[in-house]
Image (tube, grey):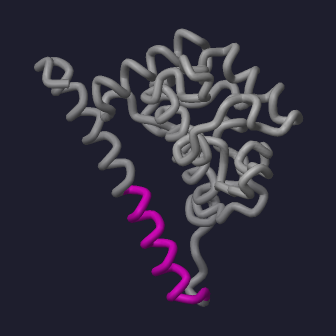
């Protein structure tokens, strides 16, 4: 698994709040700077003055480059696509990625932009499980573990509620089985050199 360690470059490229997705010159507005670069060919001098420092920061760190004619482009598209995936999804499964994507992930790890984790559940999955089972992390969590492990459900309680909670436990059980099976499949594929 890979997760983001730093967020400045991803904020500048993918956030709609970075201010880089809008160009006064031709009144073009895009969701973020990544979308603008994908749809427009622009030179640094064509950007408003207040954007120059942010764009130069990305140029200095080799996320962007200026081609022979002075147009701003991506230095390595696969690296940018991995960063985009991490920005919107928070995690990437390294072994479920293509070789090109894994190479880009390795480049980002070398730059110390991402960090590898080796746990069964990703951080978003852990958050979901904690929200569902207890209130250790979220004060508005469902706290189902404590409801059923420390007390006996009252027979007068709503049977529909118990049925709904049972379905939630069942959903978690299915998630656990799928994640464990996926790890076994990945380990088998790695041992057979199929990945």
Q: Position of residue 147 (x, y in %)?
A: 63, 65
Residue 106 or residue 146, whichever sits in front: 106
Res 190 quadrant in image: top left
User: Looking at the image, can residue 73 be seen?
Assistant: yes
Q: Where's the N terminus, which quadrant?
A: top left
Q: Position of residue 164 (x, y in %)?
A: 49, 78
Residue 146 or residue 154, whichever sits in front: 146
Q: Position of residue 120 (x, y in %)?
A: 42, 35
Q: Residue at x 55, y 52 (%)?
A: 129
Residue pushed farthest right?
50
Q: Where's the C terminus, which quadrant?
A: top left
Residue 165 or residue 146, whichever sits in front: 165
Q: Is residue 187 above or below residue 24?
A: above
Q: Residue at x 14, y 24 (%)?
A: 194
Q: How many marks?
A: 0
Res 180 quadrant in image: top left
Res 64 quadrant in image: top right
User: Looking at the image, can residue 123 be seen?
Assistant: no
Q: Residue at x 25, y 41 (%)?
A: 181
Identify the main secondary structure in magenta.
helix
Q: Residue at x 75, y 49 (%)?
A: 23
Residue pushed farthest front?
69
Which region of the structure is painted magenta?
157-173
Q: Is residue 191 above or below residue 84?
A: above
Residue 168 lies within the magenta run: yes
Residue pushed farthest left?
192
Residue 43 lies within the magenta run: no
């Amino acid at each position: 698994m890979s997760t983001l360690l730093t967020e400045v470059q991803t904020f500048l490229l993918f956030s709609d709040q970075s201010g880089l997705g809008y160009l006064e010159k031709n009144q073009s507005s895009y969701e973020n700077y990544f979308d603008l670069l994908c749809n427009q060919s622009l030179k640094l001098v064509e950007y408003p003055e207040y954007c120059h420092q942010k764009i130069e920061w990305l140029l200095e760190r080799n996320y962007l480059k200026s081609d022979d004619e002075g147009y701003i482009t991506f230095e390595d598209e696969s690296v940018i696509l991995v960063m985009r995936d991490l920005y919107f999804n928070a995690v990437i499964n390294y072994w479920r990625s293509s070789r090109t994507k894994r190479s880009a992930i390795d480049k980002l790890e070398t730059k110390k932009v991402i960090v590898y984790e080796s746990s069964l559940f990703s951080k978003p999955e852990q958050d979901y499980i904690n929200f569902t089972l207890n209130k250790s992390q979220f004060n508005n969590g469902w706290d189902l573990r404590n409801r059923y492990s420390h007390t006996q459900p009252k027979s007068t309680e709503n049977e529909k509620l118990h049925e709904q909670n049972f379905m939630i436990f069942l959903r978690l059980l299915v998630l656990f089985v799928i994640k464990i099976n996926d790890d076994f499949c990945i380990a088998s594929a790695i041992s057979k050199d199929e990945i």
